[in-house]
Amino acid sequence: MASITLDKLVKQFAGQTVLQSLSLHVPDGAFFTLLGPSGCGKTTLLRCIAGFHEPDAGRILFDRDDVTTTPAHRRDIGMVFQDYALFPDKSAFDNVAYGLRARGVRGDEMRRRVGDALDKVGLHALASRLPAQMSGGQRQRVALARALVIRPRVLLMDEPLSNLDAKMRLQMRDVILDLVREANITTVFVTHDQEEALAMSDQIALMERGAVAQLGSPEALYATPDNAYVADFIGSANVLPVTVTSVDAGGRLRYRFAGCEFDGTPGDGVDRGEARLIARPEELSLTAASPSVANGIEGKVLRRQYLGAKTAYRIAIADAAELRVELPSGHAAGGIQTGAQVQVLIPERSRVVAA
Amino acid sequence: MMRLDIRWWPWGVLTLLSLVLVMFFVFYPLGVLFANSVRGEGGEWSLASFAQLASDEDYRAAFRNSLVLGATVTALSIGVGVPFAYMVARYDFPLKNLVAILPILTIVIPEIIVGQSWLLVFGNNGLVTNAFAALGIELPSFYGWTGMIFSMTLVYYTYIYLGVLAALRGFDGQLEEAGLSLGTPPLTTRLRVLVPVVLPAVLVNALVVFTLVVGNFAISMLLGSRVPLLSVMTYNTFVSEMGGSPMLQSAMSMISIAIVAVVLFLQKRVIERKMYTMTQGRAPAAERVGSWQAMAFTGAVGIVVVLSMLPLLVVFLAAFTETSGPVMKWGQWSIGSLARVLGNSPEPIWNSLKFASMATVIGVIFAVLSSYLIIKKKNLLTQWLDYLLVLPLTISGTVLGIALIQSFNAGWIVLAGTSAIMVLCYTVRRLPFAVRNASSTLFNIPDSIEEASISLGVSPLMTLFKVVLPAMRASIASAAILMWLTTVSELSASIVVYTGGLETMPIAIFRQVDGGRLGLASAYGAALVTVILLPIVVAVKVFRIQLFSSR
Ligand SMILES: Nc1ncnc2c1ncn2[C@@H]1O[C@H](COP(=O)(O)OP(=O)(O)O)[C@@H](O)[C@H]1O
Ligand SMILES: [Mg+2]
């Protein structure tokens, strides 16, 4: 077990800068997720931590040890791959035993630890199967057992669930969480699936083109996105151009949108002038068109969409802008139909961030 | 873009080592050959040898004859191989599964055995010749064009057959159904849909057959009689220039290489232009045929297969036949020939076993290592290694032998006269096949299993041994067996480089046939066929290795 510190990592491939002076700290024992769209550098970063890529600049520390130039096989990591990467000619047992044997663990102790590891992933009965004789989910469990049985300092996983079908994916989330919680091991988990990241992580680093766009708990990323990219990637959001008219020291802000003035909450570094409003569909609400209320704006219901637990509305407002509003289906405004004139309430807690 | 981004330990060092070996044992000998071909008597730069060849009527005839022989055998091989493949791919008939597999075995019958067997059947003292003579009928001479064309076609049609069969099996039957549903009549549809599928396979393999025929030594030598041919003439020039200046043999070798180079260039164009863009689909089910048609199919395919397998039988019959000097006493059995070979001069057998096993071990190790570097550790240097390893394919055995003997008979490394040159010869000649065999498996081993091993604490070099090699175990075994089969029957290069005491079984067969002692030749032949078939039987029956699954 160890914390991981990345200090101004730079990695280039043939002139293309893939990691741009990236710094991060992964606390000891945390389940830490690298999230971001395909091609943003998640795998590259993970492989730098693993030691399969040597960064062009910067340092990597496990606790206080500088491992930047330590070869991968001496870093004491466990790794789980997207394609499972099981040794095709070895049984489940021998796959799991591989790392122990390399560490000189033999005989009864080895057999006991392999047996325990296979038990924990529920595969005791399949110990003698070859990878080709197992399902995708079973293979990924073997891979997990193989990485954990050596009790590595850190566990690295690169999109371990993306080759599984939807149902198995949900199931494996729990398997993974149970195991790493029990082993209390520092985990770096790579995914492009925001829902997976929100559901599993202690902390998420959302990446954008080789840099960290925002770092924080799932709640923080969802509730207080620093910018439109984060708001858009995590969950869905209405992002609208607004003009900030005043920001006061007490953390209150006024902005102008579609000819009206609103109260809002300032994001980091917002100043007067052009900015963006970030409003989650479920934080907006609807009332009758009149009388007009504070922080309300008039609009017309373009479409009402019943989604079971909630109902979504597409509202056209002035200047050809559109808002998506989601209300619980039992809400008082439930009777609003397509074509109705309404007022959309933008709550004061909705954030205005730099453009 | 490939960058020169190399980790020196351990892969860079191993790559350099492989490169140096290939440069020294493949590239350098070719360089020497080229240098000798453009040199005059006094060592000055000169094109005199090429001029001399161009004005030599015999050489021009040999050049013409080789091309004509190549074209004829290729055309006949297509004529036999394509219908054969079509029948096997699309129809069900009795004994189909057996006859479909046997042609693969034909490929491993040494050419020297093929030539020798047909001599035993149709030659001056042959089984059939004698039978007809007893009836008072004199058969036309088998020596010359007839014999060569007949026996080479029976060997080389297999290349066309296997290539076309693979293309037909990868063919999407839905295309044909689509054609039919659009209202084109069945025969037109078949032709229109199938020709583009089969044509590239035919062309590519036809070019292979052509180069093999032009470079063929064993059958040409035994059956060619007085027809001048390039390979035979090159060998004879080598023998007569022995000790003298090697200008003519070098010039002849360069011309042979040039012919192959042109063919390879054409082949590459064919592949690039219109190679199998076929979407992998479901091959149409084989069609059952009616009884008279089934008989015809079985008969036609059966005759070809029986004829191409016949040499295996003939050589054993002859080995156990009583002989008196050059005369085979057919029908009278004896173990005299075998006893003389095994009792008095078994040396060629031991030599063959020794050289072939050494070449197999060295070749497989080198092939596995270099294909690992080429596929898993790509960089500029491994790319060069890849190119250089294809070179031996462009060289006929005779030319390779000449190049090696010219390079290593004097100077700072003398290999001529030692076992080393025989092993070198075998290894270099068959290396490209072993590399191809190892590469095809390595392609299918994902990089991630190596990384998984490294992440578990095993160094990259140990990972090669603990993870990669075990995962490619089956393909190493099949590479080793193929290497063994092809080296133990090698003749054309080794006959150039061998000296007294280094005689191998194929060389012994060649010399005994040359001396008219067909009984002794057959005894060696039987021994050779035995050491070829045994490992195949063991591999297929005991280890269940799919020897011929990837070509
Ligand atoms: N070995 C490599 N050589 C060259 N470019 C690479 C290599 N690995 C990754 N890249 C490039 O780096 C960028 C980030 O890739 P990657 O880290 O795999 O992204 P992600 O895992 O987030 O999808 C991509 O543009 C990719 O093309
Ligand atoms: Mg990735």
Image (spheres, coloured by chain):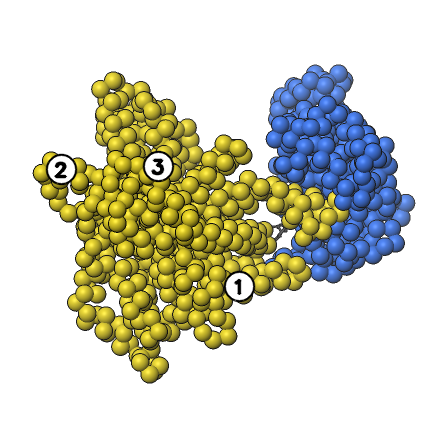
Chain colours: A blue, B yellow
* Vertical position of residue B172 compared to residue A241: above or below: above
Is residue B329 at least partly visible in the picture? yes
Let me know if marks 2 and 1 both belong to one chain: yes
Q: Which chain carries label 2?
A: B
Residue at the spot x=43%, y=34% of the render? B280
As drawn, the residue found furthest toward the left would be B136
Query: Which secondary structure lies at badge 3?
Result: helix
Residue at the spot x=67%, y=24% of the render? A167
Mark 3–mark 1 Cα distance, whole angstroms, equals: 36 Å
Q: Residues within 10 Å of mark 1 (few under 14, many from 20)?
A: some
Quadrant location of the C terminus of chain B? top left
Query: Which secondary structure lies at badge 2?
Result: helix
Which residue is labeled 3 in the image?
B103
- Badge 3 or badge 1: first in the primary sequence: 1
Mark 2–mark 3 Cα distance, whole angstroms, equals: 34 Å
Quarter assignment of residue B370: bottom right
Q: Residues within 10 Å of mark 2 (few under 14, many from 20)?
A: few
Q: How crowded is mark 3: few (under 14 residues within 10 Å), some or many (20 or more)?
A: many
Let me know if marks 3 and 1 both belong to one chain: yes
In the visual, does B261 lie left or right of A14? left
Query: Which secondary structure lies at badge 1?
Result: helix
Q: Nearer the viewer, mark 2 or mark 3?
A: 2
Quadrant location of the N terminus of chain B? bottom right
Which residue is labeled 2 in the image?
B134
Which residue is labeled 1 in the image?
B21
- Badge 2 or badge 1: first in the primary sequence: 1
Q: Which of A129 and B105 is in front in this view?
A: B105
